Amino acid sequence: MKKLIKMYGYNLAIIILIILFYLPSFQFTGIQDGDEFPSIAAPLRLAGVDWSGILSKNGIWHGYGHIFMLFPFFYLCKDWASIYIIIKSWGLFIWVFMALAIHYLCKKFLNCTECQSFVIAIICVLGVLKPDYGFGLSALTEEFIGFALVIISLLHEQNNKSPKWYLAFGSGFLMTYLFTIHSRAAIIVVSYIFVFSFFYIMNKDSIKISIILLFVVGLISGYLVYKGADSFYVRYVLSTNESVGSLDNNATSMVSRSLSSALMTSWNKNQITDLLKLIFSLTESANIISFGYLFVCITSIILYTINKYKMCKMLDGVSFIGIWGIISFTLMNLSIALKNYMKAENEPRMYLYIRYAIPFCILIILSGTIIIIREIEKFQNAYLLAGVVSVISYKMFMVLIVPKLNSKALMAMASIFKMFFCQENESPTMYFNKLLFYEIIICFVIIFRCIKHKEKLVISIYLAVSLFFWISSFDYKGKREDSIIASADASTEVLNWAEKENINIYVTTKQSNAPGYIRSLQTYNVRTKLNYLNEDEISELTDGILLSDLSKINTNVNLYSIQIDDNEYAYSKDLSLLQLIPIKEH
């Protein structure tokens, strides 16, 4: 028994800690993020649930690749809450497996002890820079990309130790299959090939041509599967007889927009300045929420890599993972900046929109923490420099970025920024001025402990801050959940009543890619195919009831209306039909 505990004790501890950490998020059953809505539609379609009436008019934003296999479970679900719990359970499995994979990677290939591997795994999956958007378990985008990065790192290290065809093929396949999740796969492929080539040259390695070819075959195979999946999505999830939605955030469109922005722009001084400000803001925002720990890890990785090469002319797996993470993180921020720098002034939320780069931080934190734990005494001056740079960059952030923000901009990172001491109606300037006090204190405690070789305390501080972030977010998430449910509760009652009375129901809202009202109405009536009308289609309405969150609809048809709840309205050409609606107080 003692032998079993010694063998699997750390793994069991990892599983228990992660379950305890994420269990409270299961209380939230409303879609916390609009990007989830079209992602879930794909496996639901395989389970016989058709949301094409909505999606054919509102497009898609995120992928669905790894939740396809959940559709058999959805057959058994009668309501939305049980469907979402299944998705969250899958997300919990991803987090547990990711942590176990990190533990195995560190222990087996990166020369860490059992205890060190345990600590690193916990930091990577529970720290504030974990690959998560912060809304709990969605298991749709950030989480799985972070998980895939860990698995690719594991396959890479295993292949270095003992080359196998299936490891090379699996790495390539997974990279391009990630296009079914999100266009960030393009960053992963480009950065991996670049770093792999760089390390191959620096280490003067010999590698079998067959391994390279199998990697390329894997890339092509994954991409073909992605194209097939997208064809299915367009045909069966996004399309109706009347209209077809668009894959507006697929890999081709996002990458092409970033490249076209760079290549077709006649750059001037102001544009270059705006681009650099946005890149700086995205990078510094990630450092702010880690209280300087991100910059400490980046500094550690760079100096460790330089030192390693000077000493033995060889770069190891710790360097590879860290450099891959830094380059991926940088390329992602560059890509987002190229796409958004011209509209950032009018949409200041873009200055805080770090969610795209967050998954890549797991590689930086993994590699940086290994170096801090094992070789903290070698980089004392570097840690002091990282602390000074963190504080200076925060001050620059206050001067260059914060004046551009408004209260709505904080919502771009509501899951991270807004939950930390942010009061209702608090301006960004007030908020970040207050945060600066805590930033300086915690940052310099981390740096000072690094200099004093107190790596355990450094890690404890980072985890404590992360835990505080998580706990303090639940009030915000609870309010958001109430708002989600309330946004369409009266409309749901009208919809259920109309189905019993055989009355046709139509819906409309302000056109967007993830409209909250329609999203709530569809999910809480999961097996009902809603008939969505665009503004120009409303004039063709001849019968039934039109539900909306719009208090006024501009149309050349004479429509009667009644208010059924706060921000919920019913319209019809037949006044007597509206008078039959049973309206309850909410």
Image: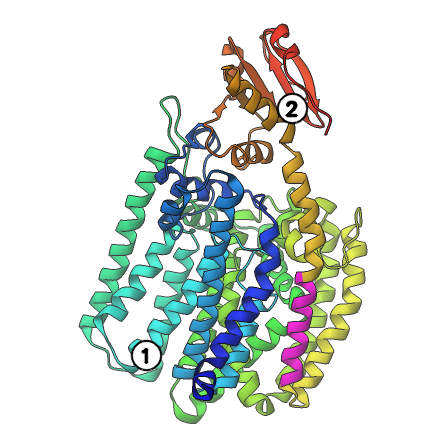
Residue sitting at the far left: 210
Assign a secondary structure to mark 2.
loop
In the image, which residues are magenta?
456-470
**Circle 1 is placed at which residue position?**
201
Q: Which mark is residue 144?
A: none
Q: Position of residue 357 (x, y in %)?
A: 52, 59
Assign a secondary structure to mark 1.
helix
Seen from the viewer's position, the closer of residues 280 and 4 is: 4
Residue 10 makes an appearance in the image: yes
Q: Position of residue 437 (x, y in %)?
A: 80, 68
Seen from the viewer's position, the closer of residues 170 and 66 is: 66
Task: Look at the image and tell me in which quarter the N terminus lies.
Answer: bottom left
Please, is residue 235 above or below residue 87 in the view? above
Instruction: State which quadrant residue 418 falls in.
Output: bottom right
> In whole angstroms, how far apart are the C-alphas of marks 2 and 1?
61 Å
- Check if residue 465 falls in the magenta segment: yes
Residue at horizontal 53 percent and vertical 68 percent from the top: 125
Mark 1, other Cα within 10 Å: few <14 / some 14–19 / many ≥20: few
Q: Earlier in the sequence, mark 2 or mark 1?
A: 1
Residue 301 makes an appearance in the image: no
Mark 2, other Cα within 10 Å: few <14 / some 14–19 / many ≥20: some
Residue at horizontal 77 percent and vertical 58 percent from the top: 421
Mark 1: which amino acid? Ile
Task: Look at the image and tell me in which quarter the C terminus lies.
Answer: top right
Mark 2: which amino acid? Leu
In screen coordinates, is 44 left or right of 218? right
In screen coordinates, is 497 left or right of 405? left
**Circle 2 is placed at which residue position?**
550
Seen from the viewer's position, the closer of residues 271 and 296 is: 296
Q: Position of residue 505 (x, y in %)?
A: 52, 19
Residue at horizontal 51 percent and vertical 53 percent from the top: 88
Residue sitting at the far front: 1
